[in-house]
Image (cartoon, grey):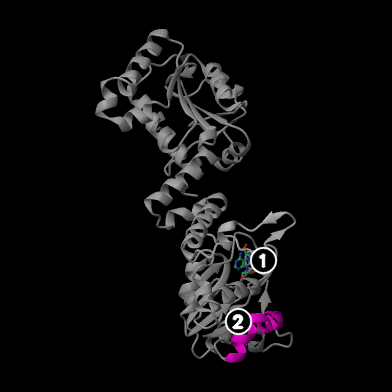
Amino acid sequence: MNVHIVTLFPEFFDTPLRSGLMGRALDSGLLRVDMVNPRDFTYDNHRSVDDRPYGGGPGMVMLAAPMSEALRSIERPGKMLLLSPKGRPLDQELAKELSASQDLTLVCGRYEGMDARLERIFPLEPVSVGDYVLNGGETGALCLLEASARLIPGFMGHGASAEDESFSQGLLEHPHYTRPEEFEGLRVPDILLSGDHGRIEAWRREASLRETVLRRPDLLPGVSLTEGESRMVGGLLGPRLGRGLYIVLLHYPVVDKLGEVRTMSLTNLDLHDIGRVSRTYGLGGFFAATPLEDQRELAERLLSHWTVGPGAKANPDRAEALSRVSVVKDLDGAIRRIQERSGQRPWIVATSARPGGGLTVRQVRRMLKDQPVCLILGTGRGLAPQVIRQAHGTLAPIRGLEGYNHLSVRSAASILMDRILGDTD
Ligand SMILES: C[S@@+](CC[C@H](N)C(=O)[O-])C[C@H]1O[C@@H](n2cnc3c(N)ncnc32)[C@H](O)[C@@H]1O
């Protein structure tokens, strides 16, 4: 692979390119790297490569002319990648794709970046190494170069080692151990000493799944799992966050369309749909709260039809979902039941379609790590102000793309559960 690095600081790459496997790949000719410095394409006394931005503002911008001459001087540039925080995130898939390149050009920005016209003149594809800002593209170019070069056949000597590393199967890698068998009282897992390669492989796959579930659950949707593995992942994910989350659907005090505080009627649809969502995401429970005794009795009758009556035989899936639903008088009743079940006082999080709530989904996930969370949803036009005041915080509203966000409480429950517990991170 021939890599052309366009940089104002070629010396930046001296040591990294001479060290370890990278140095060996260069010595063996598996990899060739040449530096192209835009400063070599300047014609004024100061050899200027930057100027002030049009429109004012801090910082300097890389001049178009030296950069464009530098890029045109590369005979066979191959793909032209521009290191930029705005780019496609660098990941193992991209590294793999690039490792098959004959030629590759990496363009390193400095200052505030380059004159934007260069991106219209050259087919520059922006690539980012993370959501943070570096002083220049050189550090990113090194990451990209190293991640791709080590996937060139022959780079690592032992062909298989890149195959079972983190990300290569979409998962994080299993832990490794070496001599001695015991260190500071900690023994290497027995199975690794058993010499049984089949069991060792199975242990490694399971350990790899565990690592991924615990550290990077966002990677899981891209991984193909056997049925048994899916169950194991579900089991690991569920208790971790979902079991600590409870939904309380309040029918009082809520407001109607005129803003008056009222009691709303309980609906069969809400019980079924939110019950099914609660089961799908492995919640600790779903409480329907109404102060009206006849409505509570009606709800209990409906539920028992599906959980123990004729409905349970006809539709066991529904029975499983509705067995998570409890009927209580009010929010305090639900909180008491959550405390009894979890042994902890929950965080109380209100929801509202109106702007004002500042809690983010990420904050709720963080709360769930150390305490149960009771998420309150309101019927009618939403929770009355006194409920919102009583909560520890209010979740930011679900935002539509066109200003309209009048969702049914069932839809809101589904969207929020998927945002908090789903694997669409
Ligand atoms: C100081 S940064 C400029 C940041 C730019 N003003 C912005 O806010 O997006 C200078 C150069 O560093 C490189 N760079 C900085 N952060 C990066 C990242 N996360 N990924 C890839 N390149 C990055 C880019 O080449 C960029 O042009």
Q: Is residue 348 above or below residue 421?
A: above
Q: Quadrant of residue 390?
A: top right
Q: Magenta part of the protein: which range?
A: 5-28
Does mark 1's beta carbon lie closer than 8 Å to ligand 1?
yes
Residue 70 at least partly seen: yes
Percent across and percent down for residue 7 are: 64, 80
Looking at marks 2 and 1 on the same chain, the residue that comes earlier in the sequence is marked by 2
Q: Would you name the residue on which mark 2 appears?
A: 6
In the picture as drawn, the residue positioned furthest to the top comes out as: 293
Residues under numbered marks 2 and 1 in contact, where contact means CB atoms less than 8 Å apart: no
Q: Is residue 55 above or below residue 368?
A: below
Quarter of image, ligand 1: bottom right
CA separation in Å, label 2 and label 1? 17 Å
Q: Quadrant of residue 267?
A: top left
Which amino acid, by three-letter code, is at mark 1? Answer: Leu
Residue 26 on the magenta span: yes
Q: Main secondary structure of the magenta part?
A: helix
Mark 2, Cα crowd under 10 Å, few <14 / some 14-19 / many 20+, is many
The residue at 36%/30% (across/down) is 320
Residue 242 on the magenta span: no
- Mark 2 residue element: strand
Percent across and percent down for residue 301 are: 33, 15
The residue at 66%/87% (across/down) is 42
The foreground one among 59 and 155 is 155
Q: Which mark is residue 134?
A: 1
The foreground one among 275 and 120 is 275
The foreground one among 303 and 413 is 303
